[in-house]
Image: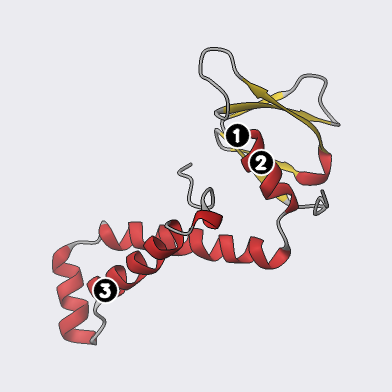
Amino acid sequence: MDIKPNRLVHLGYGKYWRSDQISGLVPIEDERGPGRRTHVHVMTLSEPIVASRSEEAIRRDMAVSEEEFRAGELRNAAADLVEELEGLSPVLARMLHHEGGLDLRRWEGRLRALLGQLESDPEQEDLFGKR
């Protein structure tokens, strides 16, 4: 596996660690079953970090190419934007549409459709995991 150096890897629980500092991944199977949490061993700590993500998801993030990494970041940004648009006041959305010609609901639908197409792709399986 070719690990990309200096890349922050999301471990879950709001934790991130540099990919080139991770020295081992051990799935935690007690009480929750496989594929749910992972002990992440890092070079600078004597005790492992408990991650809420699976070993496979962490490993995939450590080795993803720069292009795939950027595409994932774009998808995450689009998902965040859809969430923000969804929470926008209907009155404000109507004002922007009528006064400025910006149809936020159309954009929200378009982004949702694109994100839905990507989520249904089996090779994109873990890129939309909720944090």
Q: Position of residue 43 (x, y in %)?
A: 86, 31
**Cα distance in 3D space between marks 2 and 3:** 35 Å
Secondary structure at numbered mark 2: helix
The 10 Å Cα crowd at callout 3, few under 14, some 14 to 19, many 20 or more, is: some
Q: Residue at x 50, y 58 (%)?
A: 76
Secondary element at image label 1: loop
Q: Residue furthest top?
A: 31
* Residue 124 versus residue 40 in the image, above or below: below
Image position of 88 (left or right of 21)? left
Discs 1, 3 touching: Cβ within 8 Å:
no
129 left or right of 56 in image: left
Residue that badge 2 annotates? 58
Q: Tell me, for residue 104, which label it has, or none.
A: 3
Count residues near mark 2 (Cα–Cα under 10 Å), then give few for <14, some for 14-19, many for 20+: many
Disc nearer the start of the sequence (2/3):
2
* Residue at left offset 81%, top offset 50%: 3
| Image x and y of residue 18, in percent | 76, 44
Please state which amino acid type lies under the numbered disc 1: Ser
Please tell me whether residue 28 is drawn above or below residue 2 in the rendered image.
Answer: above
